[in-house]
Image (tube, grey):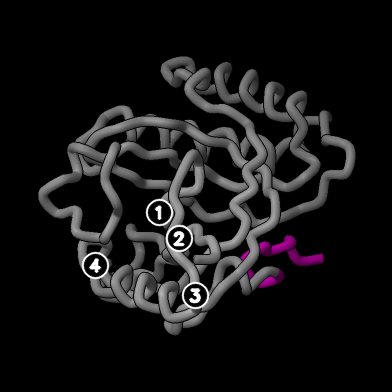
Amino acid sequence: MAAFDFKKEYKDLYLPKSKPSIIDVPTMRFITVDGEGDPNTSEFYKKAIEVLYGLSYSIKMSKKSGTQPEGYFDYVVLPLEGLWWFVGDSFDGNVAERKDEFNWTIMIRQPDFVTPEVFENARTTLSKKKLELDTSIAILKDFTEGLCAQVMHVGCYDDEAPTVATLEEFIKSQGYRTEMSGMRQHHEIYISDPRKTAPEKLKTVIRHPIARI
């Protein structure tokens, strides 16, 4: 039986069209790491990515360790996601000169069988394999994003501003306003692997939280 692929089964969450749409995002479970600064130059960001993927694959491969979690099923590890914001300022996609001001949360969704116990077991497993990794920076949490507008951006990350502008125009045209607070921020889901995909072909879901005007 093929591994369960969340992206294919939940296309409304991971494969929206290039035309904006509205979606009510349900509660989902994530492993998250919080940080700040330019992701292109931050050593902490690189470590955070390594920890996120290390924990996610430790959980996926737990079936081979003799400690398979209750309710486990084989699945494709989900894509990296990021929440991005500037303290005291709105997000319009124009970030080229401001990346050092970023606050961010990067995260990878987990299946519902990933309980705190399963997460801690994965942390222990990864810490034994990679002594240099500080796995304490990662947290398991549930996130209810709720009502949002989203669109698929195709192209370089630095060229997102026109796509964000299109999304914001759509939000207003539908009688909503963008409402960012807490974890409900400018949200990106990285569908493409930048190591294997040309910059102009990268696919990134852009999602903004909204509320009725």
- Residue at label 2? 208
Q: Residue at x 33, y 68 (%)?
A: 197
Q: First in sequence: mark 3 or mark 4?
A: 4
Q: Would residue 47 be found to the left or right of residue 213 on screen?
A: left
Q: First in sequence: mark 1 or mark 2?
A: 1
Q: First in sequence: mark 3 or mark 1?
A: 3
Secondary element under disc 4, as helix, strand or loop, is helix
Residue 175's label in the rendered image is: 3
Q: First in sequence: mark 2 or mark 4?
A: 4
Residue extent of the magenta highlight: 1-9
Secondary element under disc 1, as helix, strand or loop, is strand
How many neighbours does mark 4 have within 10 angstroms: few (below 14), some (14-19), or many (20 or more)? some
Q: Judge depth for marks 2 and 3 and give the one in front.
A: 3
Rounded to the nearest whole Å, what is the CA distance between mark 1 and mark 4?
12 Å
Figure quadrant of residue 39: top left
Rounded to the nearest whole Å, what is the CA distance between mark 3 and mark 4?
22 Å
Q: First in sequence: mark 2 or mark 3?
A: 3
Q: Tell me if label 1 and label 2 are in contact, CB under 8 Å.
A: yes
Residue 186's label in the rendered image is: 1
Q: Identify the amino acid type marked 4.
A: Ala
Q: Tell me if label 3 and label 4 are in contact, CB under 8 Å.
A: no
In this view of the protein, can residue 190 be seen by the observer? no
Rounded to the nearest whole Å, what is the CA distance between mark 2 and mark 4?
13 Å
- Residue at label 4? 161
Q: Identify the amino acid type marked 2.
A: His
Q: Residue at x 62, y 23 (%)?
A: 123
